[in-house]
Image (cartoon, grey):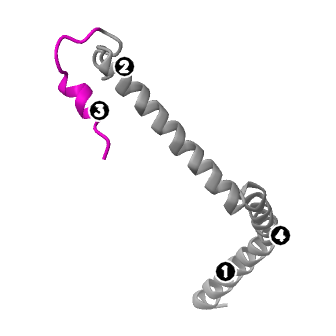
Amino acid sequence: MSQLTQALTEVEEKLRSLLEEVNRLKPYVQALEEENIKLKREMALPEKETERVIANAEHIQGVAHDNLVRLYQEGFHVCHLHFGQPLEGDCLFCMGFLRKD
């Protein structure tokens, strides 16, 4: 057998081995894909529920912002540098933090 024929035979054996490994992995991949689809279905919220959660989060953010504005108006820092400390004049950090875009 020539070296070229031997090299081709070795490549053929390696390809066969790889194909066997791919065929062994196929069921695992399919099972993982099915589980992924199932989990996505379980985790998906109905559109109405999603809208309710978003509206609730926006409401909570609005209330939290209003509370911080009230604290600032009552004379306390709301910035991370001096949170809760009494104000002595305006604080640019607090004002920047409270600015709502």
**Residue assigned mark 2:** 71
Residue 69 or residue 22, whichever sits in front: 69
Q: Residues within 10 Å of mark 3 (few under 14, many from 20)?
A: some
Q: Residues within 10 Å of mark 1 (few under 14, many from 20)?
A: few
- The answer to which of marks 1 and 4 sits earlier in the sequence is 1
Q: Which disc number belongs to residue 26?
A: none
Cα gap from disc 4 to disc 2, whole angstroms:
60 Å
Residue lying at 51% horizontally and 45% vertically, measured from the top left: 58
Q: Which disc number belongs to residue 97?
A: 3
Cα gap from disc 1 to disc 4, whole angstroms:
27 Å
Residue 97 or residue 74, whichever sits in front: 74
Residue lying at 66% horizontally and 80% vertically, measured from the top left: 10
**Residue assigned mark 4:** 27
| Residue contact between numbered discs 1 and 4, judged by CB atoms under 8 Å | no
Q: Amino acid at mark 1?
A: Glu
- The answer to which of marks 3 and 4 sits earlier in the sequence is 4
Provide the secondary structure element on which disc 2 rests: helix
Q: Amino acid at mark 2?
A: Leu
- The answer to which of marks 4 and 2 sits earlier in the sequence is 4
Provide the secondary structure element on which disc 3 rests: helix
- The answer to which of marks 1 and 3 sits earlier in the sequence is 1
Let me know if residue 36 is in the magenta part: no
User: Which numbered mark, 4 or 2, is in the foreground of this view?
Assistant: 2
Q: Is residue 67 above or below residue 7?
A: above
Residue lying at 68% horizontally and 77% vertically, measured from the top left: 14
Give the magenta part as a residue range. 86-101
User: Which numbered mark, 1 or 4, is in the foreground of this view?
Assistant: 4
**Figure quadrant of the N terminus:** bottom right
**Residue assigned mark 1:** 10
